[in-house]
Image (cartoon, rainbow, N blue to C red):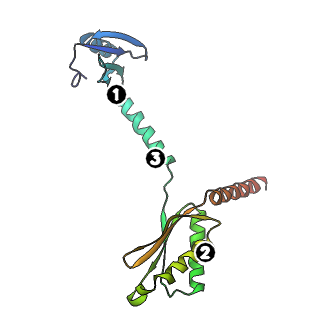
Amino acid sequence: MNEGIRVAEVRLIGPDGGNVGVVPIRQALQIARDAEMDLVEVSPGATPPVCRVMDFGKFIYEKAKKEREAKKSQTKIEVKEIRLRPKTNGAHRGFKVDDARRWLGQGHKVRVTVKFRGREMDYPEIALEDLREIVQDLVDVAVVEVPPQMEGRTMLVVLAPAKGAVKKKEKSEQAEVKTEAEA
């Protein structure tokens, strides 16, 4: 692979990973051909550039495999939403709070929005009080990530799971698994 290497000498790392030293480009290419591998420039900014004798296809495959593994281990945080109105009654709000508690326990963030219609916009303190009550109900499993704020005709607050709440849930799941294994 001599498309990108346009210098007279390179510092060569051999097929076994050992440092061969500074060699002319032709000799480096010959070493790569003899090993039935590719000559890859790994550090073009160095003087002289550093090249390595390796199987480039295998290198690309291993790199893609590591990226896939890293992607699997990433945690994807979902943002769930609860929508209310200023006139939402307490019982209905209780169902919504229960849903939020379950989602926070699963590690999701929860956005609580109160949507205003018509003259309800004149009384934002009603919605603010509702949001404060919801936050107070969920204070044991959530922390406020974004405090109550107005966005157009909606007031919202974003809650994130409290660090201890998610861990308590994981511990209880582990305890359940142990009891099932013992049975």
Query: Relative to residue 122, is residue 152 depicted above or below?
Result: above
**On the image, which quarter does residue 173 sit in?**
bottom right
Residue 140: where, in percent of width, then height?
Answer: 65, 66
Q: In which quarter of the image is the N terminus?
A: top left
Q: Which residue is drawn at 29% across and 19% down?
A: 49
How far apart in space, not on screen, are marks 1 and 3 (Cα)?
A: 23 Å
| Element marked by disc 2 | helix
Residue 154: where, in percent of width, then height?
Answer: 41, 77
**On the image, which quarter does residue 13 sit in?**
top left
Q: In which quarter of the image is the C terminus?
A: bottom right
How far apart in space, not on screen, are marks 1 and 2 (Cα)?
A: 54 Å
Label 1 amino acid?
Answer: Phe
Viewer-nearest of labels 3 and 2? 2
| Element marked by disc 3 | helix
Task: Name the residue nearer the viewer: 121 or 89.
Answer: 121
Query: Relative to residue 93, is residue 2 depicted above or below?
Result: above
Residue 170: where, in percent of width, then height?
Answer: 66, 56
Task: Name the residue nearer the viewer: 129 or 39.
Answer: 129
- Cβ atoms under marks 1 and 2 closer than 8 Å: no
Q: Mark 3 points at which residue?
A: 71
Query: Relative to residue 129, is residue 19 depicted above or below?
Result: above
Q: Is residue 118 left or right of residue 72?
A: left
Which of the labelled discs sits on residue 56, or is there none? 1
Viewer-nearest of labels 1 and 3? 3
Mark 3 crowd level (few <14, some 14–19, many ≥20, 10 Å Cα): few
Mark 1 crowd level (few <14, some 14–19, many ≥20, 10 Å Cα): some
Q: Earlier in the sequence, mark 1 or mark 3?
A: 1
How far apart in space, not on screen, are marks 3 and 2 (Cα)?
A: 32 Å
Q: Name the residue under label 2.
A: 98
| Element marked by disc 1 | helix
Q: Is residue 53 left or right of residue 65?
A: left
Q: Earlier in the sequence, mark 1 or mark 2?
A: 1
